[in-house]
Amino acid sequence: MTKNNFLKELENSGADSDIIAYYDELILDRIESGESEESVIASYDIRKIVRALEFESAKKELDVQTNGKKGRGWWIVVLALFSAPVTVPLAISLLAILFSFIVVAFSLVVGAIGGLVMGGIGIVQMIIIGESVQFILFTSGIYLIVLCIVCYVGVWIAKGLVALYRWMLVKFFKVSRRRRVV
């Protein structure tokens, strides 16, 4: 490909006259420095040049659409700096509350498992000792009723804590109620 063909292809791809003049001078400079015209033309990829030109034109178009409103986000940085003494402790306290939710749920599960194991061991011990069957059935029934009440109260407390957490997200962080927060 010759220099004229390269420049014509560049012009057909939508490059303006300044870009064509730039590449014309660039090719001439490299030819004057001793390189052959074919090797100079082969070193340029017309597709990469066209993509770069398209990117630059899109960038210019975006600047025109936004009216050059660059650098107006500085107030967000200032606001973040001034609100840090309030927002950082608030974020830490929210994380602590979330961690306490997890600890409460874990302790309820572990307590229920431990209660079942201890109840089972107690029943086995009563059978080994030879207590009457009525006493064993009565105590295991009481145990199961208490376990159900504890589980119900635990679920009720967990629902309340989740509702509190959702309320805090909506009030303090303006998270939409349509989002699912669990």
Image (cartoon, rainbow, N blue to C red):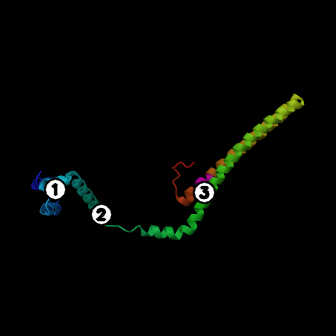
Q: Going 27% across and 57% down the picture, which residue do you hit?
A: 55
Q: Amino acid at mark 2?
A: Asp
Kind of element beneath mark 2: helix
Q: Amino acid at mark 1?
A: Val
Number of numbered callouts drawn: 3
The image quarter in which residue 146 lies: top right
Q: In front here: 172 or 115?
A: 115
Q: Is residue 165 magenta?
A: yes
According to the picture, the residue beneath numbered tag 2 turns out to be: 63
Range of the magenta residues? 163-167
According to the picture, the residue beneath numbered tag 1 turns out to be: 40
Q: Residues within 10 Å of mark 3 (few under 14, many from 20)?
A: few
Kind of element beneath mark 3: helix
Dots 3, 1 in contact, CB < 8 A: no
In the shown orientation, is residue 26 left or right of residue 173?
left
Dots 3, 2 in contact, CB < 8 A: no
Which callout, 2 or 1, points to the residue nearer the camera? Answer: 1
Q: Going from the N terminus, do you reach mark 3 or mark 1 first?
A: 1
Q: Is residue 67 magenta?
A: no
Q: Residues within 10 Å of mark 1 (few under 14, many from 20)?
A: some
Q: CA distance from mark 3 to mark 1?
A: 61 Å
According to the picture, the residue beneath numbered tag 3 turns out to be: 95
